[in-house]
Amino acid sequence: MKFMLDMHDKMRPLFEKGGKLEKLWPLFDAHDTFVFTPADTTHEGSHLRDAIDLKRVMITVIFALGPAILFGIWNAGHQHNLNAEGATAGILSDMMQGAWIVLPIIFVSYAAGGVWEVLFATVRRHEINEGFLVTGMLFPLTLPPTIPLWQVAVGISFGVVIGKEVFGGTGMNVLNPALTARAFLFFAYPVQMSGDAVWTAVDGFVGATPLSIAAATVEGSSVVEALTSAGYSFSSMLMGAIPGSIGETSALMALLGAGILLMTGIGSGRIMASMVVGALVMGTTLKLFGSSAFSDLPPHYHLVMGGFAFGCVFMATDPVSAAATARGQLIYGFLIGVIAVIVRTINPAYPEGVMLAILFMNVMAPLIDHYVLQAHIKSRAANRGLANA
Amino acid sequence: MAKVKDILIDPVSKNNPITYQILGVCSALAVTSKVQTSFVMAVALTLVVTGSNLVISLMRKMIPSKIRMIVELSVISTLVILVDQVLKATAYDVSKQLSVFVGLIITNCIVMGRAEAFALQNPPKESVLDGIGNGLGYSAILLIVGTIREIFGSGTWAGLKVMPDAYANNGLMLLPPSAFLIIGMLIWAQRTWMTKVFEED
C-alpha cells in the first residue's frame, strides 16, 4: 500500500496545473479520492463537521444494494435453470449461471456510463463523481435479464448525459439518472423491456410477471385467484424467486436494504413510509370504488408486486431528485405511492407505474419544497405578528 | 448589401426562430417523425411567412395600429388556407398525414412574430428576405429533426432504407417527446459553439 501511495504521489505533479497530463486531472483526482484519503481539507471556515461525505453516502447505498444484487444474480440463474432444464439446480449452479447472465449487464452499464462520466468531467473540469457508482448499479437491477447489452450501453448513456450532465452533473439533476435511463429504454425498445417473454433468460420462454397477470385478469374473475393459479402468492412475491427485473423481484431484499439505509441515516424513512401509505390508501380506494378486476386486488399486494419495494427504497429516496424539506418529503412520497398504483391499475399498457410515478414526482419535487418553505415562512411571520401585538 | 445578407442569413444560424427565439416548437414536435412531412411543412411555412411579410409590409402604412393583429391574422389565414387547399389538391396523402398542422400555421408564432416585429416597420424587399430567412431557419431545424427521427426511429431516410437489417428501431424517436430532446440538444450544441455570439448580445 505504501508503495502504491508513493507511486501515486510521484505522479501528482504530472496532473497538476502546468503538468503534462493537466487535462486528465479529474481521472487522477478520482483515483486519489476513491482509493486514498485525500490530504486537502476544507479551505475556509466550515460550519458543519461530519465524518460522512458524498463518497461514504454512495458506498453505503452500494452496501444496501448488496442483498438485492446477490439475490438478483441467484434468481436470474434460478429462473434460467428452472425453465431451461425443468428442475431446480443447486444454489452454486444457480449463482454461476446468474453471474453469467447478470455480470455482463452490470459491467457494460459501468463501462459505458463511466466513459461519459469521465468525458464530461474532463471537458468541464469537475470531479468524477461517486454518485455514478450508484447509478451504474441501480440501472442494471431494473432491467430484465434478457436485455441486449448494446441497449444497456445506450440506456445508461442517455441516463448519464440527458438525465444528469445536461443539468450540470450530480447535484443539479432534476430526474433520477438510473430511472431516466430505464424510461428511455422502456419507450424506445418496448419489445425488449416489457411483455411476457423477456423476464427469464431462456430463449423462447414466455412467463408472465404478477403485474401482467393482474392487468390481464378479465372482469368478473378474481385477481388473487388468477395469481395463485399462475403460482404467485403474497409470500412468493415477497421472497421474490419469480421472473422479473434483475434486482426488483424480491421485496424482502429491498426491505433489508431499507434497514441498512435507515440505520445509517442515509435514506429518508419519511419518503419510504409515506410512499407505502400512499399506495395503501390508493389501493384501498380502488378496492372500494374501482370497477376493474385489477382494482379488486388487496392493497398490500401492491407493495410486493413489480418494482414497488425496490423503487420505494432506492429510487424515490435519491437525495438529489427527491424533495428536501421534511414535510415536502411526506407529500412527495405519498403522491408517488398514489400515482404508482393509479398508473398500474387504471392503465394496463404501463404495468410498471412505479418508474413513471417517481419520475413524475421528481419533476414536482422542487415545487413541493417551494410551497412548503413559503408556508413555513408565512406561519413564522404570522406567529411573530401575534407575539408583537 | 451586407444588411441584406444579414437579414437572410441570421435567422438560419444565430437568430434561429426555433433554437434561439424558441418559436414554432409545437409544429416542430408534431410533424417531424418523417423527413417527407417535415419537408412539406417547412415549404408550407416558408411560403406563408414570406407571403404574409410581403403583404403586411405593403399595407404597413394603412393598417391602424389598434386593429393590426386582426388584419395580420386575416392575411395569414388567407395564405394558410391557400396553401392547405393546394396541398389537398396536389399531395393528398401528405396533407392527410399533416392533418391539422398545416391549418395551425395560422397560430404559428413565427409568422405572427415576423409580421409584428419586422414587416410592420420595414419595406417590402427586406420583409420578403426576412420571411425567406426565417422560413429557411425553421426548415433547417425541421429537416435536421426529421432526419434524426426517421433514421433512428424507422431506419429510413425520406422512405429510403439506410440502416442495416440488424438495426432495431428506436420507438421513442417516433413519439413527439423525442423532438423535444433533439431540439434541446440542438440548442445545447448551438450555445456551445456560438458562446461568443450570445454573450455579446
Image (cartoon, helix red, strand yellow):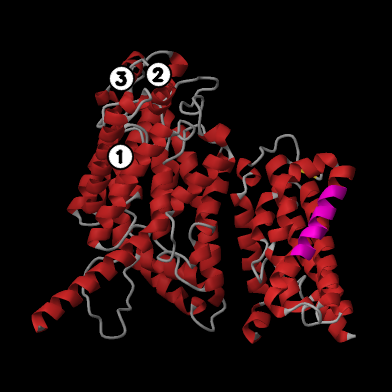
Q: Position of residue B4 (x, y in %)?
A: 87, 81
Are the residues flagged by discs 3 and 2 from a single subunit? yes
- List the residue tagged with mark 3: A224
Task: Kindly report the distance in space between the C-alpha atoms of the residues bearing marks 1 and 2.
Answer: 27 Å
Q: Residues within 10 Å of mark 1 (few under 14, many from 20)?
A: many
The amino acid type, in three-letter code, at marker 1 is Ala
Image check: A258 left or right of B10? left
**A286 or A165: nearer the eye?**
A286
The quarter of the picture where residue A75 lies is top left
The amino acid type, in three-letter code, at marker 2 is Glu
Q: Is A258 part of what is drawn in magenta?
A: no
Q: Measuring 68% from the left and 77% from the top, which residue is drawn there?
A: B66
- List the residue tagged with mark 1: A309
**Which of labels 1 and 3 is toward the front?**
3
**A166 or A5: nearer the eye?**
A166
Q: Earlier in the sequence, mark 1 or mark 2?
A: 2
Position of residue A63 relative to residue A2, above or below, is above
Give the main secondary structure of the magenta stretch: helix
Question: Which segment did they paint magenta?
Answer: B74-86
Q: Residues within 10 Å of mark 3 (few under 14, many from 20)?
A: many
Q: Is B78 part of what is drawn in magenta?
A: yes
Can the viewer see residue A152? no
Q: Where is residue B93 in the image (x, y as percent from the top left)?
A: 82, 39
Q: Measuring 54% from the left and 77% from the top, which residue is drawn there?
A: A22
Q: Where is residue B28 in the image (x, y as percent from the top left)?
A: 69, 56
**Which of labels 3 and 2 is toward the front?**
2
